[in-house]
C-alpha cells in the first residue's frame, strides 16, 4: 500500500494507550487538529524528535490532540514516555503493525498533521526541522494562538535526520 500523503483522508483507527484505555482518532479529530507521530522506541531519530513534539504539545495541546503511535509494546512505550518527558498519550500498534501498514509507513518517525476533517495537512518523515516549524505555524494560525519558540537560540539543531 502507498503511503498516505498530504491532502488524502487519514485512515481512522482505535488503539489502546499504554494504560490499556482505547483512544480513537475520530474522537481526537472531533476536538480539533491532530498531530499523530509513529515511532519505535529504539529509533535514535524518534528519540531526538519526540521532545520537540512535546514542546508543540505544551503550546497547543489545549486545543489540538497529540498522539504517539508506538510500534512497541505498552510497557517499553511507557518507559519511553517517561524517559523523554512525553505527556501526550501514546497508543500501541503492535502485532504486525496494522495501523502503520494502513498508513503505508516505511520509516519512523513519521509525523502527520491532520485537520479536523481528517485530511492530512502535512506529512514529515524522519526529523525535518522545517516540517516541525510548518506544523507549529499551521497550528498557531488555525488555533489563533501565538507561535511558540520551538528551537532555542542556544540549541544546535540539524535541518534533517533520516528515520
Image (tube, rainbow, N blue to C red):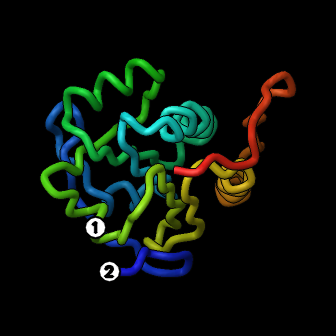
Nearer-N-terminus badge (1/2): 2
> Does residue 57 appear in this view?
no
Disc marking residue 1: 2
Closer to the camera in the image, 116 or 137: 137
Up/down of 75 relative to 91, above or below: above
Question: Label 1, label 2: how many angstroms apart (C-alpha)?
Answer: 7 Å
Closer to the camera in the image, 53 or 161: 161
Q: Is residue 24 left or right of residue 152?
A: left
Q: Is residue 32 left or right of residue 154?
A: left
Residue 50 in picture, x, y percent from top left: 52, 36
Q: Quadrant of residue 97?
A: bottom left
Residue appearing at x 31%, y 44% in the figure: 70
Assign the N terminus to one quadrant of the image: bottom left
Closer to the camera in the image, 97 or 132: 97
Residue 63 in picture, x, y percent from top left: 53, 46
Other-residue count near label 2 (Cα within 10 Å), few / some / many at <14 / 14–19 / ≥20? few
Residue 21 in picture, x, y percent from top left: 17, 39
Up/down of 158 relative to 107, above or below: above
Total marks placed? 2
- Evaluate if marks 1 and 2 touch, with contact meaning CB atoms under 8 Å apart: yes
Residue appearing at x 43%, y 75% in the figure: 4
Residue appearing at x 65%, y 54% in the figure: 135
Up/down of 23 relative to 48, above or below: below
Q: Which residue is at the far top?
A: 83
Residue 39 in picture, x, y percent from top left: 39, 46
Q: Mark 1 sits on what residue? A: 101
Residue appearing at x 19%, y 37% in the figure: 73
Amino acid at each position: 500500500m502507498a503511503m498516505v500523503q498530504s491532502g488524502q483522508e487519514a485512515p481512522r483507527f482505535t488503539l489502546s494507550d499504554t494504560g490499556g484505555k482505547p483512544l480513537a482518532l475520530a474522537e481526537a479529530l472531533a476536538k480539533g487538529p491532530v498531530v499523530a507521530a509513529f515511532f519505535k522506541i529504539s529509533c535514535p531519530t524518534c528519540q531526538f524528535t519526540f521532545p520537540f513534539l512535546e514542546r508543540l504539545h505544551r503550546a497547543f495541546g489545549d486545543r489540538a490532540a497529540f498522539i504517539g503511535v508506538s510500534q512497541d509494546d505498552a510497557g517499553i512505550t511507557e518507559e519511553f514516555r517517561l524517559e523523554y518527558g512525553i505527556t501526550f498519550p501514546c497508543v500501541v500498534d503492535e502485532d504486525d503493525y496494522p495501523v502503520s501498514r494502513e498508513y503505508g509507513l516505511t520509516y519512523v518517525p513519521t509525523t502527520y498533521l491532520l485537520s479536523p476533517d481528517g485530511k492530512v495537512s502535512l506529512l514529515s518523515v524522519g526529523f525535518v526541522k522545517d516540517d516541525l516549524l510548518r506544523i507549529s505555524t499551521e497550528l498557531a494560525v488555525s488555533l489563533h494562538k501565538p507561535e511558540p519558540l520551538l528551537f532555542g537560540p542556544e540549541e544546535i539543531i540539524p535541518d534533517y535526520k533520516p528515520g
